[in-house]
């Protein structure tokens, strides 16, 4: 049944892609089904890594608003769970680099964390605050930095925001988390964040993976082709130089995670 279901999803995606995909850069209204592929002419996703963070404080509304202004419609959020179980948006497990005050997020309660501010004066935001601010205007790439310990908080967040479920891609290095998320949300787009010791060939037949996130230095065309043969995507991270974005595009990657979404969008349209 699983194979039949996946086949039907792919066929439906191909039919939809045939009729509605006309741009090299995917648009929000064309991206609700993250499983759709059209590999002969791939739709490259440009993902704003921590927002337009090349020149603006990362993980702030200002950085993501700038990315949207530039035309980007998919944003990446790194998240950690507080002592109270709330998911906060931060790349680091501590608040020191962003706020100048050193707290371990997982060991600190919401009362303290909600009072912290970053360089531009904004608060240290929760994922819920991002959902409130952006709603369904964007697609969310949520990286669960802690993996399994954050799963219950993640599920609570999804249940609180059911209308956004189709707009969320979940990414993590923790394979057990992806398996668990697949059992709870089989239609959610799930991405394995690869480390240098892993290879796509080992995971390409896993039904609980829809995509791989690969460091640019580890990207290989043969791996991208292999993933496509098994109906999976490959996104490159974090890619900020023109020549690297162009190489990622030319190898046939499906997504580019970048601090400079304006540059990524410009190059993907060529």
Image: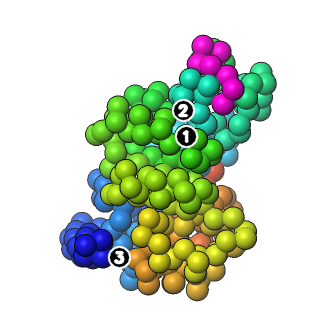
Q: What residue sits 33% from the left and 57% below the top?
A: 187
Relative depth, front residue between 62 and 235:
235
Horizontal and vertical percent position of residue 12? 22, 71
Q: What residue sits 34% from the left and 45% below the top?
A: 165
**What's drawn in magenta, residue-wise?**
106-112
**Does residue 265 appear anywhere in the picture?**
no
Sequence-first tag of 1 and 2: 2
How crowded pointer 3 is (Cα within 10 Å; few <14, some 14-19, many 20+) is rated as some
Find out whether residue 151 is within the magenta segment: no
Q: Which mark is residue 150?
A: 1
Judging from the image, what secondary structure is the residue with disc 3 in? loop
Q: Is the C-beta separation of discs 1 and 2 under 8 Å?
A: yes
Circle nearer the viewer, 3 or 2:
2
Disc 2: which residue? 87
Judging from the image, what secondary structure is the residue with disc 2 in? strand
**CA–CA distance in space, label 3 to label 2:** 34 Å
**Exactly how many numbered labels are in the figure?**
3
Disc 3: which residue? 38
Sequence-first tag of 1 and 3: 3
């Amino acid at each position: 049944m699983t194979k039949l279901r996946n086949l039907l999803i792919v066929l439906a995606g191909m039919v939809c892609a045939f009729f509605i995909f006309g741009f090299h850069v995917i648009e929000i209204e064309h991206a609700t089904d993250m499983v759709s592929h059209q590999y002969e002419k791939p739709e490259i996703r440009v993902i704003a890594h921590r927002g337009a963070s090349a020149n603006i404080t990362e993980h702030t509304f200002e950085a993501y608003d700038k990315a949207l202004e530039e035309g980007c419609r998919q944003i990446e959020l790194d998240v950690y769970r507080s002592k109270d179980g709330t998911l906060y948006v931060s790349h680091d497990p501590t608040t020191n680099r962003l706020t100048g005050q050193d707290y371990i997020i997982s060991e600190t309660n919401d009362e303290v964390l909600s009072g912290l501010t970053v360089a531009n004066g904004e608060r240290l935001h929760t994922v819920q605050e991002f959902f409130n601010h952006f709603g369904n205007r964007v697609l969310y790439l949520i990286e669960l930095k802690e993996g399994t310990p954050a799963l219950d908080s993640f599920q609570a967040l999804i249940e609180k925001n059911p209308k956004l479920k189709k707009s969320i891609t979940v990414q993590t290095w923790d394979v057990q988390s992806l398996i668990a998320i697949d059992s709870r949300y089989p239609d959610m787009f799930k991405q394995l964040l690869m480390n240098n010791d892993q290879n796509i060939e080992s995971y390409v037949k896993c039904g609980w993976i829809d995509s791989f996130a690969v460091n640019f230095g580890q990207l290989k065309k043969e791996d991208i082709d292999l993933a496509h043969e098994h109906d999976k995507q490959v996104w490159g991270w974090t890619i900020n130089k023109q020549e690297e974005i162009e190489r990622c595009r030319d190898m046939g990657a499906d997504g580019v995670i970048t601090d400079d979404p304006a540059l990524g969008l410009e190059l993907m349209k060529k």
